[in-house]
Protein backbone atom coordinates (compact mmCIF):
# COMPACT_ATOMS: atom_id res chain seq x y z
CA UNK A 1 0.00 0.00 0.00
CA UNK A 2 1.36 3.45 -0.89
CA UNK A 3 0.34 5.41 2.20
CA UNK A 4 2.06 8.60 1.04
CA UNK A 5 0.15 8.59 -2.24
CA UNK A 6 -3.11 8.01 -0.41
CA UNK A 7 -2.40 11.00 1.86
CA UNK A 8 -1.52 13.16 -1.15
CA UNK A 9 -4.71 12.11 -2.94
CA UNK A 10 -6.89 12.80 0.09
CA UNK A 11 -5.17 16.13 0.74
CA UNK A 12 -5.81 17.13 -2.88
CA UNK A 13 -9.48 16.16 -2.65
CA UNK A 14 -10.01 18.03 0.64
CA UNK A 15 -8.19 21.06 -0.78
CA UNK A 16 -10.48 21.19 -3.84
CA UNK A 17 -13.61 20.91 -1.68
CA UNK A 18 -12.35 23.51 0.79
CA UNK A 19 -11.53 25.92 -2.04
CA UNK A 20 -15.15 25.69 -3.22
CA UNK A 21 -16.30 26.60 0.29
CA UNK A 22 -13.91 29.52 0.62
CA UNK A 23 -14.94 30.86 -2.79
CA UNK A 24 -18.37 31.37 -1.22
CA UNK A 25 -17.01 33.12 1.88
CA UNK A 26 -19.19 36.18 2.50
CA UNK A 27 -17.45 39.53 2.76
CA UNK A 28 -18.76 41.59 5.67
CA UNK A 29 -19.75 38.69 7.93
CA UNK A 30 -16.38 37.99 9.58
CA UNK A 31 -17.77 38.40 13.10
CA UNK A 32 -20.88 36.25 12.62
CA UNK A 33 -21.24 33.41 15.11
CA UNK A 34 -24.40 31.31 15.57
CA UNK A 35 -23.89 31.13 19.34
CA UNK A 36 -21.74 32.95 21.92
CA UNK A 37 -19.66 29.80 22.41
CA UNK A 38 -19.08 29.39 18.65
CA UNK A 39 -16.06 30.60 16.72
CA UNK A 40 -16.65 33.64 14.56
CA UNK A 41 -17.01 32.96 10.85
CA UNK A 42 -13.60 34.35 9.83
CA UNK A 43 -11.86 32.64 12.74
CA UNK A 44 -13.38 29.32 11.70
CA UNK A 45 -12.45 29.73 8.04
CA UNK A 46 -8.93 30.86 8.91
CA UNK A 47 -8.48 27.85 11.17
CA UNK A 48 -9.41 25.58 8.25
CA UNK A 49 -6.74 27.16 6.05
CA UNK A 50 -4.19 26.81 8.88
CA UNK A 51 -4.87 23.10 9.20
CA UNK A 52 -3.75 22.63 5.60
CA UNK A 53 -0.29 23.73 6.79
CA UNK A 54 0.02 21.22 9.61
CA UNK A 55 1.60 18.42 7.56
CA UNK A 56 5.08 19.97 7.26
CA UNK A 57 5.05 20.85 10.95
CA UNK A 58 4.01 17.34 11.94
CA UNK A 59 6.71 15.78 9.78
CA UNK A 60 9.47 18.04 11.18
CA UNK A 61 8.60 17.94 14.89
CA UNK A 62 7.63 15.54 17.66
CA UNK A 63 5.08 17.65 19.55
CA UNK A 64 2.96 20.77 19.31
CA UNK A 65 2.53 22.50 22.66
CA UNK A 66 -0.42 24.87 22.39
CA UNK A 67 1.00 26.99 25.21
CA UNK A 68 3.99 27.88 23.02
CA UNK A 69 2.03 29.11 20.02
CA UNK A 70 1.16 32.56 18.84
CA UNK A 71 -2.13 33.28 17.18
CA UNK A 72 -1.76 34.70 13.69
CA UNK A 73 -3.31 38.07 12.93
CA UNK A 74 -6.92 37.63 11.89
CA UNK A 75 -7.69 37.80 8.20
CA UNK A 76 -10.12 40.35 6.84
CA UNK A 77 -10.93 39.09 3.34
CA UNK A 78 -11.85 36.03 1.30
CA UNK A 79 -8.72 36.64 -0.77
CA UNK A 80 -6.51 36.24 2.30
CA UNK A 81 -8.21 32.93 3.07
CA UNK A 82 -7.69 31.67 -0.46
CA UNK A 83 -4.04 32.75 -0.51
CA UNK A 84 -3.38 31.05 2.84
CA UNK A 85 -5.09 27.88 1.64
CA UNK A 86 -2.91 27.84 -1.50
CA UNK A 87 0.30 28.46 0.46
CA UNK A 88 -0.44 25.83 3.10
CA UNK A 89 -1.65 23.22 0.62
CA UNK A 90 1.50 23.67 -1.49
CA UNK A 91 3.70 23.36 1.61
CA UNK A 92 1.95 20.14 2.63
CA UNK A 93 2.27 18.60 -0.83
CA UNK A 94 5.94 19.53 -0.91
CA UNK A 95 6.51 18.04 2.55
CA UNK A 96 4.84 14.77 1.55
CA UNK A 97 6.88 14.66 -1.65
CA UNK A 98 10.12 14.94 0.35
CA UNK A 99 9.61 12.03 2.78
CA UNK A 100 9.44 8.27 2.70
CA UNK A 101 6.87 5.98 4.25
CA UNK A 102 9.21 5.52 7.22
CA UNK A 103 8.80 9.22 8.11
CA UNK A 104 5.15 8.52 8.91
CA UNK A 105 5.96 5.96 11.63
CA UNK A 106 7.34 8.00 14.58
CA UNK A 107 4.93 9.28 17.19
CA UNK A 108 3.74 12.86 17.31
CA UNK A 109 1.74 14.56 20.07
CA UNK A 110 -0.20 17.65 21.01
CA UNK A 111 0.32 19.05 24.48
CA UNK A 112 -0.51 21.99 26.68
CA UNK A 113 2.21 23.27 29.03
CA UNK A 114 4.08 20.00 28.64
CA UNK A 115 1.09 17.79 29.43
CA UNK A 116 0.39 15.45 26.54
CA UNK A 117 -3.21 15.69 25.35
CA UNK A 118 -3.13 13.23 22.45
CA UNK A 119 -0.60 11.16 20.55
CA UNK A 120 -0.59 9.40 17.19
CA UNK A 121 1.94 8.20 14.68
CA UNK A 122 2.83 11.01 12.28
CA UNK A 123 0.58 9.26 9.76
CA UNK A 124 -2.22 9.28 12.33
CA UNK A 125 -1.61 12.95 13.14
CA UNK A 126 -1.83 13.91 9.46
CA UNK A 127 -5.01 11.84 9.11
CA UNK A 128 -6.38 13.58 12.20
CA UNK A 129 -5.65 16.95 10.59
CA UNK A 130 -7.61 15.91 7.50
CA UNK A 131 -10.47 14.89 9.79
CA UNK A 132 -10.26 18.37 11.35
CA UNK A 133 -10.62 19.95 7.91
CA UNK A 134 -13.76 17.92 7.24
CA UNK A 135 -15.20 18.63 10.68
CA UNK A 136 -14.64 22.38 10.56
CA UNK A 137 -15.73 22.66 6.94
CA UNK A 138 -19.04 21.08 7.95
CA UNK A 139 -19.35 23.76 10.65
CA UNK A 140 -18.68 26.37 7.98
CA UNK A 141 -21.51 24.89 5.92
CA UNK A 142 -23.90 25.35 8.85
CA UNK A 143 -22.80 28.99 9.21
CA UNK A 144 -23.41 29.48 5.48
CA UNK A 145 -26.87 27.86 5.66
CA UNK A 146 -27.85 30.06 8.60
CA UNK A 147 -26.89 33.11 6.52
CA UNK A 148 -28.56 31.99 3.28
CA UNK A 149 -25.18 31.51 1.60
CA UNK A 150 -24.87 28.79 -1.01
CA UNK A 151 -23.41 25.63 0.54
CA UNK A 152 -21.12 23.80 -1.89
CA UNK A 153 -21.24 20.02 -2.10
CA UNK A 154 -18.50 18.09 -0.39
CA UNK A 155 -18.74 14.48 -1.58
CA UNK A 156 -21.55 14.97 -4.03
CA UNK A 157 -23.95 17.78 -4.82
CA UNK A 158 -25.42 19.85 -2.01
CA UNK A 159 -29.07 20.84 -1.85
CA UNK A 160 -28.02 24.18 -3.34
CA UNK A 161 -26.44 22.46 -6.34
CA UNK A 162 -29.38 20.18 -7.12
CA UNK A 163 -32.48 21.17 -8.99
CA UNK A 164 -35.56 19.40 -7.75
Image (spheres, rainbow, N blue to C red):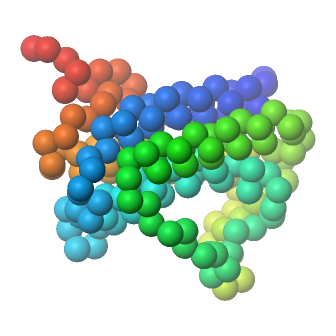
Query: Does residue 91 lie above or below 14 as drawn?
Result: below
Residue beneath the point at 23% across and 57% down: 29
Q: Quadrant of the N terminus?
A: top right
Residue 121 shows in the view: no
> Left or right of 7: which side holds 62?
right
Which residue shows up at 74% across the image and 56% down it? 57
- Give the residue displayed 23% in from the left and 21% down from the top: 161
Q: Quadrant of residue 33?
A: bottom left
Horizontal side of residue 11 vs 34, given as left or right = right
Q: Position of residue 10 (x, y in %)?
A: 60, 30
Residue 50 percent across, percent down from the top left:
55, 55
Q: Where is residue 138, by image quadrant?
A: top left
- Pick the residue in front: 39 or 29: 29
Q: Position of residue 120 (x, y in %)?
A: 71, 56
Front-lying residue, 134 or 87: 87
Taking 4 as reference, is 36 above or below it? below
x and y, in percent, of residue 130 in the image? 56, 44
Residue 33 seen: yes
Number of numbered callouts drawn: 0
Asked which quadrant contains residue 21, the reply is top left
Against 100, residue 115 (above or below) is below
Q: Which residue is depicted at the point 87% across and 45% down?
A: 103
Specify the quadrant that holds the C terminus. top left
Amino acid sequence: MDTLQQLKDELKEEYAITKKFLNEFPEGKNDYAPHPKSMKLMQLAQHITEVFGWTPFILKTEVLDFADGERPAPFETRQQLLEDLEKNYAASVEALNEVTEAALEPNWAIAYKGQKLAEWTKYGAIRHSLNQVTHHRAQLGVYYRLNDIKVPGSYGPSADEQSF
